[in-house]
Amino acid sequence: MSTPTGPASGLPVRMPRPRQSGRHRRPEPVVAPEGAPALVLAVPGVPGPAVRSLAEEVISIARSELPGLDARIGYLDSEDAEYPTLDVVLARTAAERSARVEQARAAGREAADPQGPAAVVVPLLAGPDSALIRRIRQAVMDSRAAAELTDVLGPHPLLAEGLHVRLSEAGLARADRARLFTVATAADGIILATVGGEEAVQAAGITGMLLAARLAVPVMAAALDQEGAIAAMAAQLRGSGSVQLAVAPYLIGPEVAEGLLDAAAKEAECAVAEALGAYPAIGKLVLSQYAAALGIAPQPQGSPVH
C-alpha cells in the first residue's frame, strides 16, 4: 500500500543522477533545505490506483530534481483511508513538524519555533479551475495547518511541449519541430480541451499559441465542461479550412470526469490524444511552484560547469 509520502515498497523510485567527473561535470544538485516545508500535491478527481500511480510518478520526478524533498499527496475527493484527504495530510504534516521541535527540545537541543508554512500545496492542475481551487483552499483552512497554496502549473512552454509529445504519440502531429518528415494522420487543426470555464479557456489559449508555433497549424481552446463547446470549436475550425482535427487534452487527467473527453471528441468527430498525465515536465513544474514559494532554485540537470 502506498503512503502519503510516496510509493509502496517495491515500486520504482527515481534517484538523482550520479555526479560526473571532469572539467565538464554537472554541478552538485541543490538539496532541499533542512526543515523545509513539505510539498503537498493536491490531487483532484476520484482517487483510485491509476490516479495514485500518476500522482506518485509526479512526486517521484520532483524528488529526483530536488534530493531530500519531503513530498506528500492529498486527495480532494476521497472517502477511503487508503487515499488520505488533503486536509488530513496537511494536519498530519503540521503535527509532525511540531513533534520534531518538541523532541529536539526534550533532548536538550536548541530548536527555534517553526517559521513559515508547514507545507506548500501545489494543485495538480494545468490551468485555473475556480471551483477546484476554492475546494483546495477550503481544505487548507479545514486542516488548520500553516500552509501556502501556489498557482496552477500553466500556462507554460513545457506544457506546450507535453501536448506536442502526446499528439505525436497518437500519430496526430509530427514529432519534430523542423517538419523534416510527414505524418499522414497529422491534424491540420487542434482543439485544446480544458475544464474550468472561460478563465481556463483563456489560460489554455496562451499555451495554445505556443503549441501553434511548434506545429504551424491553428490551435484553439474550448471548455469540456461547457456543453457543445468542443463541437462548436470544431465547426469553427472546419469553417476556416481545417479538415483533419484533433483534440489535445489540456489536462493532467484526474480533474476531468471519466468519459467526458471521449464523448466530446466523438460529438465533434475528432481524433483525440492522451491527457498530459505524468509527462516529466509536470513533475518539474510542480517542483518549480514549490521552489518559487520558498525562494529556492533547484539546479537544472544537464547544465555543464566549465
Image (tube, rainbow, N blue to C red):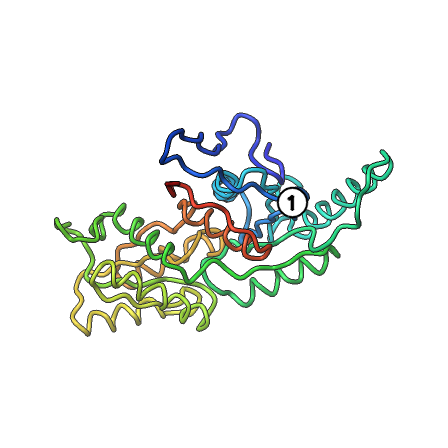
The total of numbered circles placed on residues is 1
Q: Nearer the viewer, residue 120 or 232?
A: 120
159 w.r.t. 56: above or below: below
Quadrant of the rendered image containing residue 259 = bottom left
Quadrant of the rendered image containing residue 301 = top left
Q: Residue at x 60, y 52 (%)?
A: 77
In the rendering, at what x and y percent does residue 190 appear?
26, 62
Residue marked by disc 1: 84
* Side of 105 where 90 appears, left or right: left
In the rendering, at what x and y percent does residue 112 appear?
79, 48
Q: Nearer the viewer, residue 2 or 228?
A: 2
Q: Residue at x 64, y 51 (%)?
A: 86
In the rendering, at what x and y percent does residue 188 appear?
19, 61
Q: Residue at x 22, y 48 (%)?
A: 175
Q: How would you rate the neighbour count of disc 1 (Cα within 10 Å): few for under 14, some for 14-19, many for 20 or more?
A: many
* Side of 207 where 89 appears, left or right: right
In the rendering, at what x and y percent does residue 105 appear?
85, 39
Image quarter hosting the C terminus = top left
* Side of 165 where 13 appears, left or right: right
Quadrant of the rendered image containing residue 31 = top right
Q: Residue at x 40, y 71 (%)?
A: 202
Q: Nearer the viewer, residue 176 or 277?
A: 176
Q: What amino acid does circle 1 point to?
A: Pro
* Side of 286 where 178 appears, left or right: left
Q: Secondary structure at mark 1?
A: loop
Image quarter hosting the N terminus = top right
